[in-house]
Amino acid sequence: MTSTFEANAIRHFQELLRIPTISGSGPKGAYDKCASWLVDYLAGVGLTAHVFSPVAGKPIVLATWAGKDPTLPGVLLNSHYDVVPVMAESWKYDPFGAEILDNGMIVARGTQDMKSVCIQYVEAVRLLKESGFVPARNIHICFVPDEEIGGVDGMGEFLKSAEYKAIQPLAIALDEGLANPTNKFTVFYGERTPWWIYVKATGPTGHGSRFIENTATSKLIAICNKALAFRAEQEKALGASCGCKHGDMKKKKLGDVTTINLTMLKSGVSMDGGASYALNVIPTEATAGFDIRISPNTDLTEFQNMLNEWCEADGVSWSYMVKPLHEHHVTAVDEATNPLCHKFLETCKELGMEIDLDVFPAATDSRFLRQLGVPALGFSPMNNTEVLLHEHNEMLHKDTFVKGIYVYRDIFTRLLA
Ligand SMILES: CSCC[C@H](NC=O)C(=O)O
Ligand SMILES: [Zn+2]
Ligand SMILES: [Zn+2]
């Protein structure tokens, strides 16, 4: 039986899902609409939100629930409110309709990534407030845009703001995680470092019927082949024993290996305004783009040296598409270093939740926080749930969504007492 509280929480979730906050600024002012919806929503639980836009049209929403001792390091509950685009023709349902299917699934872009968490934080606070609970320390709830396109104008700007300075110091930040298809929940203590790079090769032109030496495309293909060989090696390592003290019990997961994927290839001498190519002319330039995710187990300088070696031929160079991080930043979860992170995991255990402690395979806003030394854990309370983020027909069961609220409530009750 769904209680009134649960029905209202689901309704709020649907309302948020119906705002099409596709990254960038969203269609037709969706970001602004979302920010004002969040302000009203937070007001409904007695929290006064502050909205500020370091970059025009990209509002950040921040609210604080004052703790008993505001001088103690605070807690940041972060979520991004933007979502990735949809290919609507491939969806069986309206991606921004938030329809509830007969089997209880709520379907919409953002159900898993991560509007569920946006609502679950606030509903957990609602329950705690209604029960008379007052947290020991300040709890800051923050909603940021643009995570899906790198976070520079969202979390990046937030961390430079006076508003962020005003909430220092922080004992722990929580941000998104991933669904776990088993009965376990996953907590992420780090993530792979993303490097997006272009490799550009140049070479001579000539007639397409001859054996021209050192062409741009042949040089580029040689590098692509090296990248594919490296990729195959890493894929082989995936699922192998990680060689640690856990022996075969702990197999390498995606976060423990490095992936490199060729996601762009460009060359050719175009004609007719780009409609076709002169296939009998050797192009003088060829470019490839790679999405690389470097595991904390891989040394970044060594990796960079490998890229330099791959690209040592004349006329070949590589560059970053986005300014990268040159150091891995992971959050220690031992009691001495980060007591609240340790307590978070202990609390989960006490609540009977089985936890996988992993490295997040992609990138989240947590990397910016960790870079500044803020202990951050990635956690989205969705177990027994297929991972559907960024996919067509992204969905989440309404019962899983509601259970997640109680999971946060129970964790916060113990963590923040
Ligand atoms: C390099 S920033 C990209 C951020 C994005 N985050 C979630 O999917 C990702 O591709 O991992
Ligand atoms: Zn996300
Ligand atoms: Zn995402």
Image (cartoon, rainbow, N blue to C red):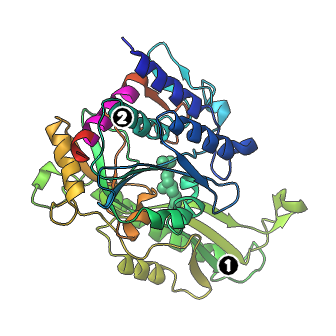
Name the residue at 64% across, 45% down: 22
Name the residue at 23% across, 49% down: 344
Instruction: Please give left or right for residue 6 compared with residue 143 in the image.
Output: left
Mark 2 near ligand 2 (CB under 8 Å)? no
| Residue at the bottom extreme, as displayed | 314
Closest to the observer: 298 or 373?
373
Q: In this view, does 190 lie above or below 139?
A: below
Quarter of the image where one finds residue 335: bottom left
Write the start and end of the magenta stretch as one range.
400-412
Q: Is residue 267 above or below residue 306?
A: above
Residue 293 visible to the viewer:
no
Rendering coords of residue 253 (x, y %): 29, 52
Name the residue at 42% across, 23% down: 398
Image quadrant in which the C terminus is located: top left
Quarter of the image where one finds residue 133: top left
Rendering coords of residue 47 (x, y %): 48, 42
- In the image, residue 289 lies in the stretch drawn in magenta: no
Q: Is residue 7 above or below residue 120?
A: above
Residue type of the residue flagged with mark 2: Lys
Q: Which of marks 1 and 2 is in front?
A: 2
Q: In this view, does 225 lie above or below 91?
A: below
Main SS of the magenta part reads helix
Residue with the mark numbered 2: 129
Image quadrant in which the N terminus is located: top left
Instruction: Please give left or right for residue 325 compared with residue 298 in the image.
Output: right
Residue 406 visible to the viewer:
yes
Rendering coords of residue 233 (x, y %): 34, 63
Closest to the observer: 208 or 242?
242
* Disc 1 to disc 2: CB gap under 8 Å: no
Q: How crowded is mark 1: few (under 14 residues within 10 Å), some or many (20 or more)?
A: few
SS category of the residue bearing label 1: loop
Residue with the mark numbered 1: 211
